[in-house]
Structure formats: C-alpha cells, structure tokens
C-alpha cells in the first residue's frame, strides 16, 4: 500500500497529468458554475481516451469531476438552482442566505466545508481501500434500500413545518418518477400518450431546471428585485469579510463537517445507491441533531450549507470504490471513468486493489488535490461572485433562463425537454406561490428509481426476512441510536440555551409581518453567528417575511385559494391516472406507483378538506415549507404583466428554437429581451447574445458534438 | 427490335453509371457522424469510438469521424435519428437488436422499419460461451435444483433483454426451477449480487467473472449447470474443477417443444449480431457497397482487433448476409414458436 501510495504520488505529479489538470481546470470551474447540471466535459476526454495515456485520461476525468462538484454549490446559493446530482440540499439554506445578503458568508462556509469534506473523503477512502471488497460484500440490496429510504425520509425533515404538503408532494414526485419505461416489467408506465418522448421518463435536468431555475427567475422579475434583498448598501463592500466570516463559521462547526463528510463517504461507497442520497441524509441528520436546527434550517442557516456540502464532496471519493472495485459506477461521471478504464485495457475489479493500486490511489489523490487547488481560487473569486446577487432582475433572469435552457436541451438533445421545463416551471411557480415545498419532489425524482429497484430486489430475494438480516438491523440500530443520542443532546442544548436567553430577545427577533415563532427561533438558534449584521439579516429574512405574510389569518376562499385548488386538482388527476394505469402493469412494475398513490391520496384528501372546509388558519398550513416563497407587492396587475413577460419570453424562445434552431433563437431572444426590458443597451445585449452563440458553437458544437433537435426552418447549418 | 435496342442501351448506361458511382464514392474532406443511441461510456459507445479510430483509413478519402451520443428510448432515438438523415453515407451507427426483435415479435416500433434496415455488418460476432452456474452452497447439480422444489434466483436487468441472462429467461419460461429477479442495472451488478449470496444462479462468463471475482473460482463456488451458444472451454471447466455441463435444450425434466427450441436458437443467433452497424434507409447501393467493404476491413484490421481486445471485447466480423439470414428464420417461425419468441423478448408476459 505504501509503495503504491508513493508511486501514485510521483505519477500524478509528473508533467503529463499536471499539464492535463492545468488545462482542464478553467473548463471545470466554468462547468460547475453553469446552473442546471454543468457541462459534459468528460465526454470529450472519452473521445480522446484511446489516444491518451491512462494516467492522463483518468486524471483529467476525476479532476474535472471533483473540481466542477466544488463549484456546483455556487448556482445553488446564488440562483437557487440545485445541481442535477450534487448540491441539491445546499439550495435550502444557501439561497435564503443569498436573499438575506449573506451570499459571501454562504460561499465562504461552502468552500471551507468543501475542502474539509474532500480531504476527509480522500483519507477515509485510503483507509477503507484494503478492506473495501470484504466490507461491501457484507451489505446487500436490503441495506442499499434502507440507505436510499433514509434519503427519501429527508422529505419528512425538509417538510417538517408543512407535513401534509410535504408528504403529498413527495408522493407526487415518486409518481412522476415512475413515468416511462420500467425495467421491472418491461413496459412503459403512465406515458399519457407521449410514449416515445416519455420512454425514459422525466429526466432530472429538465425537472430541476423547471421546478427551481425557472420559478426563481420568474420570482426575480415579478418581484422586480435583485437576489439580495437586504444589506444592499454593505453587501459588496463587506463581501470579503463575509467570506472570511463564512469560513470561520464553517470551522466552528467542525464536528458537523466531519460527521457529514463521513456520511457522504459511507453512502457513496454503497454500490448502486449513488451520491444523491448522501447530502439529503447529511442535511436531515444535521437539521435533527444541531441545536435549534429544526427551527432555523431552511431559513438561511449556515449549518444547512455545511452539512450538505461536506457530504457533497466526500461522496466523490466514495463512489470511486464501487466503480473501480466492482465495475458499478455510482454516477454519470463515474460511468465515464469506468469506460476510460476499459478503453485503456484496465478491468475494474480486485486488480484495482493489487496490480493497479497505484492508479486507484492516484484517483483519491486527484480528488484531494482538486480540492486544494480549486477552493483557494474560488475563495479568491467569492467576493466577485457576490456581485451576481445585486444584478438587476431583468438582466440576470433572462441570462439564467438562457443558460439553464441550454443545459436542458443539451442533456438529451430533446425538444420535448423544453416542454417539460415549461410544464415543471408552471408547477414550480404554483408550488412556490401557494407554499408547497418543492424539495420533496426533487428528492423523490432523484431517488425513486433506486428506491423502487432495491425494494423490489430485496423483497424478491429475501422476502420480509430482509428486515431480520443482521446487516440491515445493524444499520437500523445505528441510525436509531444516533438519532436518539442527538435528540437528547439537542434537547439538553436547547434547555441550556433557553435558560440563558430567557426573556432577552423574544421581542427583538420577531419578524415583521407575523410568524413570531419562526422569527424567535431563527434568531435564537443562530447565536453562534458572531456578527450582529448577520443576526439582524436573518431576523428580517424575506423568507420569514414571506411565510409570515402567508400565515396571517383571515384569508377566505379567494382567487388565491382557488389557485391551490387547481394545483390539487392537477395532482389528484395524475394520481387517479397513475392508479388506473397501474392495473395494466406486469408484476413488480405496479408496486411503487401504487404505493406512491396510496401514500399520497390520504394527504391529498386532508389538504382538500382543509382548504375547502377548514378554518382560514388551517387552510394556510404552516408557513415553514423549507422553500423560498414569492415576494409580492401591492400591485397585482403590474406583477401579472411581469409574469407574462418573463414566462412569455421563455415560451416564445422555446417555440423559436423549435422553428429556427437553438443557434439563432436563443441568442436572438436574449438580445431582444435585454435590449427592451433589461435596458442593457445595444452593446451589452449584443455582447451577451454573442457570448451565448460562442458557447453554443465553440463548446457544444465543436467540443462536445451535441446533436441538437432538428428545427422546422433551420437558420444555422448543423451536423 | 427498336425497343429492345433501347432497353439494352439503357441497361448499359445504368451499368456504367453504377460503376462510375461506385468508383466515385469518396469521402475526402467529409465528416462522418457516427451516431450512438446510448449515453457515453456504454458498450455500444466504446465499440463505436474504437471503430471511429480505425475506420477512416479504410474509407475512400479518409474522412473525419465524430461520435455523437443520441441516447433515449433504449436506442430508439438514435436509430430514428439515423433513419431521418440523408442517405449519403455520412451518417452511420450501431443499431439495437432489441428494436429488430420487437418489430419481428409484432410490436410496431415508431420511426423504425426492419424491412428498410441496411446492415453493414456486426463487429463482435463470436461464438461466445454462455454457461449458467449455481452456487455450490445452494445446489451441486441440475438434479439438485429440480429436487429443491423451488425456483432459484438469478439477477437480470429487465424481461427479454440481453444475451447474458437469456438462458435463465428461457428456463424460467419453460417452467424450470429458476426465477429471474429484474431491476439490476448491469452485468457487473448481477455478478455482485451473486458474489454476496443475494442470488443463487449466475451466467458465469469466462472472460469477465473470474477477473472481477477470482474468489468465486478459488473457493469453488461455481457449479456449471448448462450452456448455450457454445460449450465452455476445457480450460474454463478445469479452473472451475467441473465436468462438461448439459446443453440447455437437453435438460432433463423440462418439456421443451421444437417450436420453443427454434425460437430460442433464433433469439440467440440474432443476439450474436449485437451492435451491428446500419445506414439510413434508401442509401444508394454504391455507397452501401463501399461502406460494407470498409466495415469489414476495419473489423478485420489488426489495429482494431488489438484495441478492442485490450478494451475487453472479442472481435469477429459478422456479414450482412449472415444477419439477414437470421432475420429470415424469425419470419419462418410457426405460430406457437412466434408466440414463445415474443415472450422471450419480454412481450406478451
């Protein structure tokens, strides 16, 4: 092992891999910054792999993966757009922090956590490598199911304040994820007449883009507000000190970082489970175990960012193990690593721990090295990135819509995905507007397939005896013990805190516009923040204000309530369709769709009953939805016009892409919007449009060879 | 007589035109789009990239190759994309056997017509051995399996797909003591499930299983039960310390009709032509001929054989004629054989 470690070190830091890393670094940074899933740069490496030395090819792919994962929390924090695989839970607290003018704090904490998570992940892996095969063969599908279930149970955590809506949306998310071809039955499920388009179901990128990016962009334009709504006068001036403050805050939660990193490693190494569950589990455990976490998480608590990002980066190392040792890739990036290994004549398996151990160790080094190189760069740029949070909405929103649309289109080259973005965008707007939490849908869509597979495989292989497997019980007991211990510790900490602060801050922290309880708790639980401005910002959180506004009693059956009725009708209709359709599915393929409908229906009925017959207070279920609300002013007409403007722009742009192709339509529409609504001037608008054209032609066409959907009257030669 | 002269003259002109066209097919300065209907990194993608590296030197004009991934619909989207392109020889790609099988099983696959299929040849046509092994801790023979009175579990990805678990699917369908557990994502996952004792039966591929799980061989956990396509090599049997297992179609205790045997053999043969390359429909014959020649030369090129072998693939050229002959056998199946074939393909379950 020692010899391999030394060999790996000298191989990695030889001229070839070093030069490769230097070349790929700027691309990786840019890739991670793109909201909506990043750029599939690894595919380029795959094209070159047959010409490259395996050390160089592997180093490039692993370095790119690790480096772009480091930058993925940036769109989550600054735009409220989670990554397609990583940084999903980061959005829950990172974006509210940016709205509070604390983007610098969030970024500083994120990067510090990232480097710690990455290095802990690498060290844990090095230690685990020699015993990894024996360890992993001890676990089976039942345990993989349990771990995935833990990720899904994060739904209960992220919707703790709105339990009915949370479970309902999670069940809806699982039902959505069931659409498409089912491996278990060999049939297409609930395709609604779009059998060809929906053969592969709703893929994650259009769902993420539609559900999160589009509504956030719309919210900016409708509210005519920048991302940062507070500390506007000091935000840029104090950006550097904010970043430092974030770093210090992350460091002050070192045990949380370590704990979350280890969760990332553990979940990551489970073959087939993948990394998506890791940060949700880490986030959920942090919310339940950190003092005051149940009250402050989701409102801009830096600990939420820390927990998510620590797991987010340590998981990278974790998924390496099943890839190289068993040939089971834990993510899309790892599938490329696997292909490069095969192309260069290296068979994944036990030889990776003997004959090719140096190569395996070098991958671990590469992940650690990527963290050590990229994090300082990003820290240096963090104050500049904070400027994004004060860009005028009519400039930022269309650019974000353009980028994420490009990402959605390039992911599968399918025009139908743009339709899906619009549909999920509308759904996201409704959910955001009527206080339905969106994260449960994301969790469900990300994990439903894995959950279904392992549930079916486990029940088929073990029957209900799987519940008695020692491994299953060991994980379950560990989870219960940790939870009980943490709850006890949390209760003790809360009692101590209450006795210290009793009577001191209750009036001061109450947020304007209602939600007194949330306001109290938010301020109380963030006593660890050493900056008065930060505490003040949280107390005046626009999120808290939104929720407070919503929870004010006295709302009658208004147009607003009718809007939620429409939402409920849509969800109910889909449940009914899925349930009826499920009777045509073969055995196995019908289990999860029916489970989703059967779990969701009672909550749907409760919500309908509450909305139609409940008291006004009960109609508006708790405001704590772990999601960002809509800030609305007093002029519904103008806001309606703004909504039509930005949504209409997006729709027309998509129609134009269908008619004349992406090369002309996307830059052209951006140019028009920026000229007329963004007031960016000829030069600025043309500059942005040309930058998009350069991105499409230079990167997607020439480097990635993306096959764009065919347009009716193409104005740009392709192919 | 005048008409006869005219017809002879016309035929002569056509003949000359054909010859000229064949000579004129030249891809100099052109770019060939090699369309892969899966995401980057899979078996189809890897073979395509290896092909793209060697093929230029075998095509007139040494064109540039670009591999483009068009994933979706289990290969259907990529196939449809190829079918929509101009038949000028500049778009080519591996087709998906499962789509052909579905069409032949009576399922109308949108945007795809097997009658219009122009096949160039298959790159990995070899007489691979597929042997089903049982875990020695569970049973030691086929007779033991029958006596157990229950179905032994075997991991698989989905009904009716893949040549690796096909024997298991067949035995399950004819009422043998095997049950396929669907939902695993790859052959590697199927191996892993067997290695950790989650499943009891596995297709023990000589080239892959011992490399990934040498302990299964060392601890003598593999008991070969039956084979199809080609018998296991003596060397492989010696490593497992086992005697030659039975042919799948001669397993005692199973009632297998002639029609079922024919359907199974047909499905196995078609699967052997996995990853066969196709051109868009209506591609002119001179271009097809040029491509077929270049395809064969590429697959038989020692450079291709070397890099594909390094990547773990056994290379073997399968001619278009061979492929078409296999397709014809499906059309000739009797009704009960056709129905069984549909079941093997995962339809009519």
Image (cartoon, coloured by chain):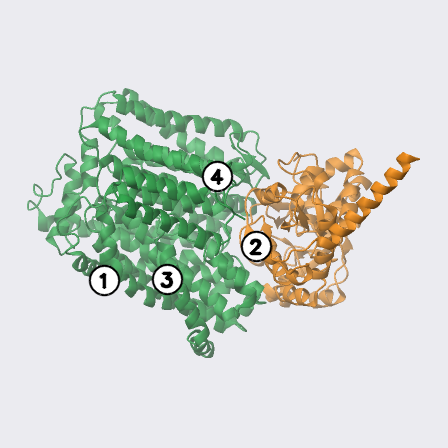
Mark 4: few/some/many CA within 10 Å (<14, 14-19, 20+): many
User: Is residue A271 visible from the viewing direction of this image?
Assistant: yes
Mark 1, residue position: A251
User: Is residue B321 visible from the viewing direction of this image?
Assistant: no
Cα–Cα gap, marks 1 and 4: 45 Å
- Label 4 chain ID: A
Mark 2, residue position: B67
Cα–Cα gap, marks 3 and 4: 30 Å
Query: Helix or strand or loop: what does disc 3 sit on?
Result: helix
Query: Helix or strand or loop: what does disc 1 sit on?
Result: helix
Query: Helix or strand or loop: what does disc 4 sit on?
Result: helix
Callout 3–callout 4 Cβ contact below 8 Å: no
Q: Is residue B39 left or right of residue A34?
A: right
Query: Helix or strand or loop: what does disc 2 sit on?
Result: strand
Of marks 3 and 4, which one's residue comes earlier in the chain? Answer: 3
Which of the numbered marks, if any, corresponds to residue A415? 4
- Residue A71 is situated, as x and y percent measured from the top left of the image, at 34, 57
Of marks 1 and 4, which one's residue comes earlier in the chain? Answer: 1
Same chain for labels 3 and 4? Say yes or no.
Answer: yes
- Residue A363 is situated, as x and y percent measured from the top left of the image, at 44, 67
- Residue A563 is situated, as x and y percent measured from the top left of the image, at 31, 25
Query: Can you tell which chain is drawn orange?
Result: B
Residue at the outermost left position? A504
Callout 1–callout 3 Cβ contact below 8 Å: no
Which of the numbered marks, if any, corresponds to residue A26? 3
């Amino acid at each position: 092992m020692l010899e391999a470690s030394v060999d790996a070190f000298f191989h990695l830091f030889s001229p070839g891999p070093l030069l490769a890393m230097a070349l790929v670094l700027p691309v990786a940074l840019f890739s991670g910054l793109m909201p909506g899933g990043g750029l599939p740069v690894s595919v380029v490496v795959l094209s070159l792999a047959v010409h490259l030395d395996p050390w160089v090819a592997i180093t490039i792919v692993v370095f790119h993966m690790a480096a772009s994962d480091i930058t993925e929390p940036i769109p989550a924090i600054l735009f409220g757009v989670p990554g397609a695989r990583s940084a999903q839970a980061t959005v829950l607290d990172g974006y509210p922090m940016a709205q509070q003018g604390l983007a610098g704090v969030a970024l500083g904490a994120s990067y510090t956590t990232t480097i710690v998570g990455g290095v802990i992940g690498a060290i844990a892996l090095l230690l685990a490598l020699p015993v990894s095969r024996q360890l992993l063969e001890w676990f089976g599908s039942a345990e993989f199911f349990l771990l995935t279930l833990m990720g899904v149970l994060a739904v209960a955590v992220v919707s703790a304040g709105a339990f009915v809506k949370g479970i309902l949306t999670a069940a809806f998310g699982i039902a959505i994820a069931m659409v498409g071809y089912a491996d278990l039955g060999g049939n297409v499920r609930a395709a609604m007449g779009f059998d060809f388009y929906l053969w592969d179901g709703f893929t994650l990128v259009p769902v993420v883009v539609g559900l999160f990016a589009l509504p956030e962009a719309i919210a900016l334009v409708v509210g005519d507000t920048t991302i940062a709504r507070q500390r506007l006068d000091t935000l840029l001036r104090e950006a550097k000190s904010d970043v430092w403050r974030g770093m210090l805050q992350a460091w002050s939660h070192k045990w949380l970082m370590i704990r979350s990193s280890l969760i990332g490693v553990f979940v990551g190494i489970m073959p087939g489970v993948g990394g998506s569950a890791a940060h949700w589990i880490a986030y959920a455990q942090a919310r339940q175990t950190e003092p005051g976490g149940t009250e402050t998480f989701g409102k801009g608590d830096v600990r939420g960012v820390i927990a998510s990002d620590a797991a987010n980066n340590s998981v990278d190392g974790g998924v390496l193990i099943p890839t190289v040792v068993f040939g089971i890739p834990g993510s899309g990036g790892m599938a490329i690593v696997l292909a490069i290994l095969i192309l260069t004549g290296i068979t994944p398996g036990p030889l990776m721990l003997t004959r090719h151990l140096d190569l395996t160790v070098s991958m671990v080094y590469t992940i650690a090295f990527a963290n050590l190189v990229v994090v300082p760069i990003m820290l240096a740029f963090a104050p500049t990135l904070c400027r994004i949070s004060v860009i005028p909405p009519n400039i930022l929103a269309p650019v974000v819509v353009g980028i994420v649309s490009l990402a959605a289109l390039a992911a599968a080259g399918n025009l139908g995905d743009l339709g899906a973005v619009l549909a999920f965008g509308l759904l996201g707007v409704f959910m955001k507007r009527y206080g339905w939490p969106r994260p449960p849908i994301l969790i469900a869509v990300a994990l439903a397939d894995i959950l279904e597979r392992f549930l079916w495989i486990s029940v088929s292989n073990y029957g209900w005896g799987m519940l008695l497997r020692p491994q299953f019980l060991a994980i379950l007991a560990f989870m219960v013990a940790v939870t009980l211990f943490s709850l006890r510790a949390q209760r003790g900490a809360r009692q101590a805190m209450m006795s210290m602060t009793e009577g001191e801050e209750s009036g001061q922290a109450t947020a304007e516009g209602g939600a007194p309880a949330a306001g109290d708790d938010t301020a109380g639980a963030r006593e660890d923040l050493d900056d008065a401005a930060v505490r003040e910002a949280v107390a005046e959180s626009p999120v808290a204000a939104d929720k407070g506004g919503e929870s004010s009693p006295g709302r009658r059956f208004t147009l607003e309530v009718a809007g939620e009725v429409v939402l409920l009708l849509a969800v109910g209709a889909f449940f009914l369709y899925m349930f009826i359709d499920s009777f045509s599915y073969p055995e196995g393929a019908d289990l999860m769709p029916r489970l989703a409908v059967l779990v969701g229906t009672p909550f749907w009925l409760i919500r309908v009953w509450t909305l139609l017959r409940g008291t006004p207070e009960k109609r508006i279920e708790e405001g704590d939805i772990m999601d960002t609300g809509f800030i609305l002013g007093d002029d519904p007409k103008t806001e309606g016009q703004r909504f039509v403007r930005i949504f209409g722009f997006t729709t027309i742009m998509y129609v134009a892409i269908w008619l004349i192709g992406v090369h002309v339509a996307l830059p052209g529409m951006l140019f028009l919007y920026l000229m007329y609504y963004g007031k960016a001037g000829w030069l600025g608008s043309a500059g942005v449009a040309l930058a998009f054209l350069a991105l499409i032609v230079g990167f997607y066409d020439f480097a990635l060879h993306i096959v764009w959907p065919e347009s009716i009257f193409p104005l740009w030669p392709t192919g | 007589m005048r008409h006869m002269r005219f017809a002879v003259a016309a035929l002569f002109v056509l003949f000359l035109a054909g010859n000229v066209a064949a000579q004129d097919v030249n891809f100099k300065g052109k770019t060939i789009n090699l369309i892969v209907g899966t995401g980057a990194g899979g078996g189809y993608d890897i073979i395509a990239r290896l092909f793209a590296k060697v093929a230029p030197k075998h095509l007139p004009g040494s064109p540039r190759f670009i591999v483009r991934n068009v994933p979706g619909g289990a290969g259907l989207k990529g196939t449809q994309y190829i079918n929509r392109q101009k038949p000028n020889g500049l778009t080519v790609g591996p087709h998906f056997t499962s789509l052909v099988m579905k069409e032949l099983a009576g399922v109308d696959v949108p945007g795809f017509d097997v009658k219009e299929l122009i096949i160039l040849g298959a790159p990995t046509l070899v007489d691979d051995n597929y042997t089903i092994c049982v875990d020695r801790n569970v049973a030691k023979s086929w007779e033991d399996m029958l006596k157990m009175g229950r179905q032994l579990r075997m991991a698989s990805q989905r009904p009716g797909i893949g040549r690796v678990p096909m024997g298991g699917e067949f035995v399950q369908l004819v009422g043998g003591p095997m049950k396929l557990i669907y939902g695993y994502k790859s052959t590697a996952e199927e191996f892993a499930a067997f290695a950790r004792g989650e499943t009891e039966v596995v297709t023990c591929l000589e080239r892959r299983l011992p490399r990934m799980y040498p302990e299964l061989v060392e601890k003598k956990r593999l008991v070969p039960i039956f084979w199809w396509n080609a018998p296991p090599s003596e060397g492989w049997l010696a490593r497992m310390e086992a005697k030659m297992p039975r042919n799948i179609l001669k397993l005692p205790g199973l009632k297998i009709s002639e029609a079922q045997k024919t359907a199974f053999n047909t499905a196995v043969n078609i699967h052997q032509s996995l990853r066969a390359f196709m051109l868009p429909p209506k591609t002119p014959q001179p271009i097809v001929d040029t491509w077929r020649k270049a395809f064969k030369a590429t697959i038989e090129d020692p450079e291709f054989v070397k890099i594909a072998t390094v990547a773990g693939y056994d290379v073997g050229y399968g001619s278009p004629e061979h492929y078409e002959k296999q397709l014809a056998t499906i059309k000739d199946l009797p009704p009960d054989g056709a129905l069984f074939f549909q079941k093997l393909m995962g339809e009519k379950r």
